[in-house]
Image (cartoon, rainbow, N blue to C red):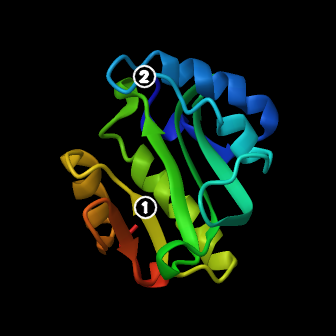
């Protein structure tokens, strides 16, 4: 396996979706990627109150998708941005990839003046909740966390 420094980060294109789906399918614990991911990136799948534009960033180890994050502008819960997807392959976890991807997405939001960002997290997903809290998110309700101002976040 390569080191953290060999991982390349970049914005995803439609042609990256099959690789993203393949990588996620190998994660037995989390299962396959959302089958609408390609439509989401292309702007043909719209989560509730989503607005264009949207983006997915990848962490790549050669041709392997080590992780990805996606988000879009929104009006949900009075927010201006929503983190839609975040996943890192088990083989690449605990190496800073999720933190780096989150920082990239938060910068993307900030460039669009979308400073209040929300994310839906299952109440029982303590690992994700802990990660987002360390990055500066706070509880909005039972399922949702929010960054009140991502320009002040700890990512």
Mark 2 crowdedness (10 Å alpha carbons): few <14, some 14-19, many ≥20: few
Answer with the quarter of the image where residue 28 lies: top left
Local secondary structure at mark 1: strand
- Residue 144 drawn at (x, y percent): 35, 64
Which residue is at a point 78% across and 51% down the rendered structure image? 43
Q: According to the image, label 2 marks what residue?
A: 31
Counting the numbered discs, the total is 2
In the displayed structure image, the side of residue 113 where residue 69 appears, left or right: left
In the displayed structure image, the side of residue 11 where residue 23 appears, left or right: left
Q: According to the image, label 1 marks what residue?
A: 119
Answer with the quarter of the image where residue 20 lies: top right
- Residue 125 drawn at (x, y percent): 24, 45
Which quadrant of the rendered structure holds the C terminus? bottom left
- Of 115 and 145, nearer the camera is 145
- Residue 67 drawn at (x, y percent): 50, 36
Which residue is at a point 70% across and 45% down the rendered structure image? 40
Please report whichever mark, 2 or 1, sits nearer to the chain's N-terminal start: 2
Question: Does residue 12 appear anywhere in the picture?
Answer: no
Which residue is at a point 32% across and 22% down the rendered structure image? 29
- Residue 15 drawn at (x, y percent): 80, 30
Which quadrant of the rendered structure holds the N terminus? top left
């Amino acid at each position: 396996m390569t080191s953290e420094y060999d991982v390349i980060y970049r914005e995803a294109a439609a042609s990256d979706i099959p690789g993203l789906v393949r990588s996620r399918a190998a994660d037995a614990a989390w299962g396959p990627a959302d089958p609408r991911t390609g439509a989401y990136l292309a702007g043909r799948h719209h989560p509730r109150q989503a607005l264009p534009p949207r983006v997915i960033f990848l962490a790549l180890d050669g041709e392997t998708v080590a992780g990805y994050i996606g988000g879009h502008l929104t009006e949900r819960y009075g927010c201006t941005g929503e983190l839609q997807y975040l996943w890192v392959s088990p083989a690449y976890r605990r190496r800073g990839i999720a933190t780096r991807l989150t920082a990239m997405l938060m910068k993307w939001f900030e460039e669009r003046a979308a400073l209040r960002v929300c994310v839906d997290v299952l109440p029982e997903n303590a690992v994700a909740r802990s990660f987002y809290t360390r990055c500066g998110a706070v509880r909005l309700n039972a399922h949702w966390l929010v960054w009140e101002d991502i320009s002040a976040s700890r990512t």
